[in-house]
Image (cartoon, rainbow, N blue to C red):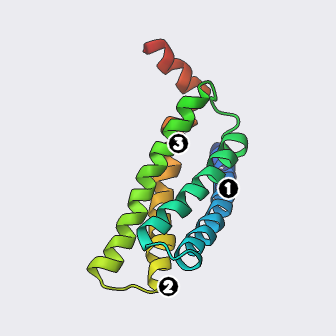
């Protein structure tokens, strides 16, 4: 029991940050799925265009939630740079999603609502999320100490 308590104390900040990231991600995910399906089935857009536009909507939600809640304690010095990095890294996450969707539709030949949603909105979002959490902490919402030491060096 003491080991668990010690581990929790050591990683409490990361655990709380990850929980907030997950909450923001859940809201962004609902936005993603709803918007993507609206673009696909409500507006009749092609699968890649609908996925891309749904992801852009979710990205706006995620930036606001992460900037002002999840990582509010981290460096926010350069808002425009943070914004550009966030959207650039989300572009990489989007490419991961699109690759999963493309592979499922084009290579596997599975093209229906279930296949599209599993490929783009489950597998693609899952893999993209792992990349996003790591990259946000590393480059966008850096710890104040890390940001200050990099500014001194560069």
Q: x and y percent of residue 87 in the render?
A: 51, 44
The x, y position of residue 135, in whole percent, is: 47, 44
Check disc 3 and report the residue beneath it: 86
- Against 64, residue 144 (above or below) is above
- Percent across and percent down for residue 53 are 52, 61
Q: Which mark is residue 24?
A: 1
* Mark nearer the viewer, 2 or 1: 2
State which quadrant residue 142 falls in.
top right
Q: How far apart are the two marked residues, 3 and 2, measured between alpha carbons? A: 29 Å
Report whether residue 52 is seen.
yes
Of labels 3 and 1, earlier in sequence is 1
Label 2 element class: helix
Would residue 35 be found to the left or right of residue 51 on screen? right
Q: CA distance from mark 3 to mark 1?
A: 14 Å
The reply to whether residue 126 is in sight is no
Q: Classify 12 as above or below 77.
A: below
Residue at 55% x, 71% y is 39
Q: Which residue is mark 2?
A: 113
- 122 lies above or below 81: below
* Mark 3 vs mark 1: in front: 3
Q: Is residue 43 left or right of residue 73?
A: left
Lower sequence index among marks 2 and 1: 1
Q: Is residue 89 left or right of residue 4?
A: left
In the image, 24: left or right of 139? right
């Amino acid at each position: 029991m003491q080991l668990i308590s010690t581990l929790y104390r050591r990683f409490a900040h990361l655990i709380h940050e990850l929980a907030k990231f997950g909450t923001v991600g859940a809201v962004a995910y609902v936005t993603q799925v709803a918007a993507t399906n609206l673009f696909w089935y409500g507006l009749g857009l092609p699968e890649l265009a609908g996925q891309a536009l749904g992801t852009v909507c979710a990205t706006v939600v995620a930036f606001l939630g992460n900037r002002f809640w999840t990582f509010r304690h981290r460096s926010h010095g350069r808002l425009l740079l943070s914004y550009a990095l966030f959207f650039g890294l989300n572009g990489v996450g989007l490419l991961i999603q699109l690759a999963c969707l493309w592979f499922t539709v084009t290579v596997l030949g599975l093209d229906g609502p279930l296949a599209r949603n599993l490929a783009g909105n489950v597998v693609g979002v899952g893999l993209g999320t792992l990349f996003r959490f790591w990259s946000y902490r590393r480059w966008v919402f850096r710890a104040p100490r890390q940001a200050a030491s990099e500014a001194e060096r560069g």
